Image (spheres, grey):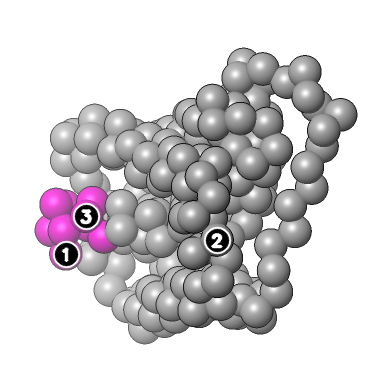
Amino acid sequence: MSPSAAVFTILTALLIGAMSPGPSFVIVARNAIGLSRRDGLATALGMGIGGVFFSGIALLGLYTLLAAVTWLYVSLKVAGGLYLIYLASKIWRGASRPLAFTQDNANAGSTPRKSFWIGLSTQLSNPKTAIYYGSIFAALLPQHPPLWCYLALPPAIFSIEAGWYTVVAVCFSSKRPREMYLRAKTWVDRVAAGAITALGLRLIFAAHRVGL
């Protein structure tokens, strides 16, 4: 796989992961519904910064080790694929359950600054996000990527994370789009679960091709 194709695939996988319901999704939606659109947007910004942090760790730390330990690179591919399948199964099982939003009106004094830090801390404290990033990068990025990959990925990932959660904040602070999503939630979740499962299987079956 060429570096440009790998970067495109990584960004697509991270977009699918961001779109899958989880703690980050619920926090952004809750702040947009229970506080204000500005709070939802500030939370989305925090999610984007958290994504840049994880991408930096994956690029600068993980690959230094993987470049020297081939068996670890292969093992992480397999482990990453298994984790993605596990994550997809949880999303599928929860597809028919309604999202549980807790509207903390006790936080009525919240400000966009506080919402930003809530978004950032939620992203950084979620071990599943860290594992997801590590799995995707280890599985798809070549062991010796060109310099432009290191320069292009962090801002692109910020655009994906912050951009998606901005859409969530805008939609959930508007009545009609929110109702449309909640009606279609079961099928949206199941499509996302299917896509993540396919990616996980690909990682497992391609694990022996270390250079790809």
Q: Which residue is mark 1?
A: 1
Q: Where, quadrant-wise, is the C terminus in this rendering?
A: bottom left
Q: Earlier in the sequence, mark 1 or mark 2?
A: 1
Mark 2 crowd level (few <14, some 14–19, many ≥20, 10 Å Cα): few
Write the start and end of the magenta stretch as one range: 1-9
Q: Is residue 140 left or right of residue 168?
A: left
- Asked whether residue 168 is drawn in magenta, I would say no
Q: Earlier in the sequence, mark 1 or mark 3?
A: 1
Judged from the image, the secondary structure of the residue bearing numbered disc 3 is: helix
Main secondary structure found in the magenta portion: helix
Give the residue displayed 62% in from the left and 57% down from the top.
Answer: 22
Judged from the image, the secondary structure of the residue bearing numbered disc 2 is: helix
Type of residue at label 2?
Answer: Glu
- Asked whether residue 7 is drawn in magenta, I would say yes
Q: Earlier in the sequence, mark 3 or mark 2?
A: 3
Q: Which is more foreground, mark 1 or mark 2?
A: 2
Using the image as rendered, state which of residue 63 and residue 55 is in the foreground.
Answer: 55
Q: On screen, 185 above or below 69?
A: below
**Residue 136 in the image, given as x and y percentages of width and height:** 41, 58
**Residue 131 in the image, given as x and y percentages of width and height:** 56, 54
**Residue 198 in the image, given as x and y percentages of width and height:** 39, 80
The answer to whether residue 22 is seen in the rendering is: yes
Give the residue displayed 74% in from the left and 52% down from the top.
Answer: 101
Q: Is residue 71 left or right of residue 120?
A: left
Using the image as rendered, state which of residue 149 and residue 124 is in the foreground.
Answer: 124
Q: In the image, which disc is placed on residue 179?
A: 2
